[in-house]
Image (cartoon, grey):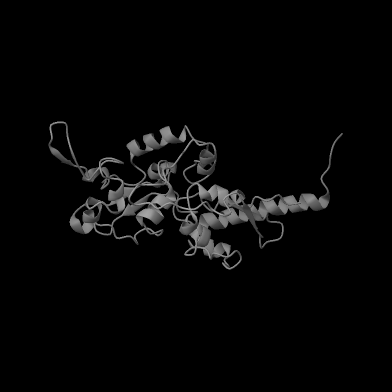
Amino acid sequence: MRCHASPGRTRSLLLTVFLLALLAGVAAAAGSRRLPAHEYGTVLMDNFSKQNQLDPVVFRHWVHRAKHTCRLCHVDIGFAMTAGQTRVREKDNRAGAYCGVCHNGKEAFACEEKNLVGQKIENCTRCHSAVAVGHDDKSRDSFDLLAESLPEGRFGNRIDWAEAGRNEQVVPKDFIAGVSFPRARMKHEQGNIRLDAKLTGLPDIVFSHKEHALWNSCDLCHPEVFALKAGQSVFTMQDIFAGQFCGACHGKVAFPLKDCGRCHSKPVY
């Protein structure tokens, strides 16, 4: 017995596919140049490096994301959400602030360490790298090794971090004594919120607080990115493409905006 979809349902499905493809094209056009998977989310930190005759710091988000939550760095430690706004100085790090919270010789390698015979060794070039972004074979090999053990994503760095978190394949650290503060359980940690799509036939957005809770906390998104009360933040896809609201993370570090179906996921009937 052969089943046939109704003409109306077929038109709705075709319209949905067309709208998702259109959004993906707009998102791709709005984004920056495409980077290889191991460089998606990479940031060059160069507020002071060149003026001090040093190469910029090459910060790869995937290295840190595999070990720590976004909240730990952007709330507890105090890094701004926009690249370049946190003007980190070497003396800040050596004093135990910013990068120095972890790069202290215990949590991660320090700015300065001693070798087996007690001689001091400067680790400057481990961060201040002369290797051009996209051409670091050592970083690519390390990334490939990590990516092979995690669920595959479709875009960005092609790792599905949400699924990796659900499966506990990645268990990011979320607390450092003396820096972090205890957080209350999120009120909506288990809940989903539906956001209506503005185009007829386009699937509505299903926003999961639980999915975001692993990496973030209330204070990472509220009230600076989104208002505390549902419905008070009014925004468009163009705002998101411009790096606001959801675009504060998606398209920069979290999966890119061309992956429309990850958010516009409610079935259309």
Asked if residue 145 shows in the view, the reply is: yes
Q: Which image quarter: residue 25?
A: bottom right
Query: At which x and y percent is residue 223?
Result: 49, 64
Q: Which image quarter: residue 46?
A: bottom left
Q: Does residue 53 sit above or below 152 in this rendering? A: below
Q: Which image quarter: residue 3?
A: top right
Asked if residue 248 shows in the view, the reply is: no
Query: At which x and y percent is residue 71?
Result: 43, 52
Residue at screen point 79% across, 50% down = 9
Residue situated in front as seen by the camera: 29 or 211: 211
Residue situated in front as seen by the camera: 134 or 42: 42
Query: At which x and y percent is residue 132?
Result: 31, 46
Query: At which x and y percent is residue 166?
Result: 54, 40
In the picture, measured across the screen, residue 192 lies left or right of residue 7, that is left
> Dividing the image into 4 quarters, which one contains the N terminus?
top right
Q: Does residue 85 sit above or below 108 in this rendering? A: below
Q: Does residue 195 sit above or below 141 in this rendering? A: below
Residue at screen point 57% across, 54% down = 187
Residue extending furthest toward the right: 1
In the picture, measured across the screen, residue 200 lies left or right of residue 5, that is left
